Image (cartoon, helix red, strand yellow):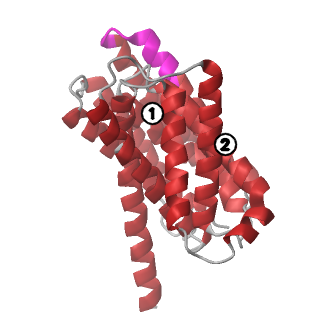
Amino acid sequence: MRKSAVKSKSSRLLAVFACFLWSTAFMGVKTGLDSMPPMLFAGVRFTLAGLAVALFYRKPGKIRQLKSHWRQLLLVGFFQTFSLYALFFYSLTMMRASTGAIVNGIGPMVVALGAHFFLPGSRLRVRQFLCLVLGAAGVVLVAVSGTASGSAEPEYAGILLMFMSLLVGATASILVAKSSSDLDPFLLNAGQLTAGGLGLLLFALILGDRPYDGIQVFHFSLALGWLVFVSAAAFSIWYYLLKVRKEALSSMAVWRFLIPVSGAALSWIFMADDSPDLLSAAGMALTGFSIYQFYRVPEGRKETVGES
């Protein structure tokens, strides 16, 4: 019993650490986008991250697993890295980093909704569907705050792209949860990051992307280095928890609600052109309330979302 409790506590700590790493990505992406177009920047980031994970992957049988599961690696790479982050990076060219962090906060509920339809034992109750509506209302308040700041149209477009990235991300999470149990999570991460990153680089080449004139080499290098570490570490931790420790996807998803809170707060503290306002705070509070109600287990019930 004690061993199980220790394992559960360490899983929670790992999940919190991964989510904190992800929450810093909004600032890093905004900084890097000052020096490089979205597709090119994303391609460089994820290709390097995938190679970094592969470099430190030391388990035997790597080539055999690559041959056996290459279709899964390409499929997850297409959704998790190529599609998701193409939308994510472009969305952040159209909104503040804090707005992106808050909008991204409904992602776990999107995952739970996708699991409702595509994973056995993950049906949602009526109360939880109503919570999804409340969460969406919080996002609307965030969008209205963009209107008040004089950048309504770009923020709305960015929010739409960010929401599309959440749908793609939910698909990727379901694919990872349903992937073969003998596929090593670190190899899965290395393969999907490299495949998706190379796809982004190819697309950037087709678009004719190149670094902007007057690139800020020092700031760009810091942002890129940090983002490579975030991608390599956070995704590896997440896949390890899902595939090795067999944590439930729906139970894991709740921890990702830490990302918008931490991401928005960091952006307000460190980004010169970003600051909190009443509507954004209200939107975050409403989304947070909906999240709490979404995952609150009524008295007398023991199951959680995603468990039958």
Q: Main secondary structure of the magenta part?
A: helix
Checking the image for residue 200, the label placed there is none
Residue 306 visible, this orientation: no
Residue 4 lies, in percent from the top left, at 47, 85
According to the picture, the residue beneath numbered tag 2 turns out to be: 79
In the image, is 24 to the left or to the right of 138? left
SS assignment at label 2: helix
Q: CA distance from mark 2 to mark 1?
A: 19 Å
In the image, is 23 to the left or to the right of 156? left
Query: Sequence-wise, which precedes: disc 2 or disc 1?
Result: 2
Query: Which sits in the foreground, 293 or 162?
Result: 162
Q: Quadrant of residue 129?
A: top right
Q: Which residues are magenta?
A: 148-159
Q: What's the amino acid at mark 1?
A: Val
Residue 150 visible, this orientation: yes
Q: Which residue is found at the position 47% from the left and 51% from the top?
A: 231
Q: Which residue is found at the position 44% from the left and 71% from the top?
A: 11
SS assignment at label 1: helix
Q: Quadrant of residue 58?
A: bottom right
Neighbours of disc 1 within 10 Å: few (<14), some (14-19), many (20+): many
Residue 55 lies, in percent from the top left, at 52, 63
Q: Which residue is found at the position 64% from the left and 28% from the top?
A: 203
Checking the image for residue 103, the label placed there is 1
Asked if the stretch drawn in magenta spans residue 141, the answer is no
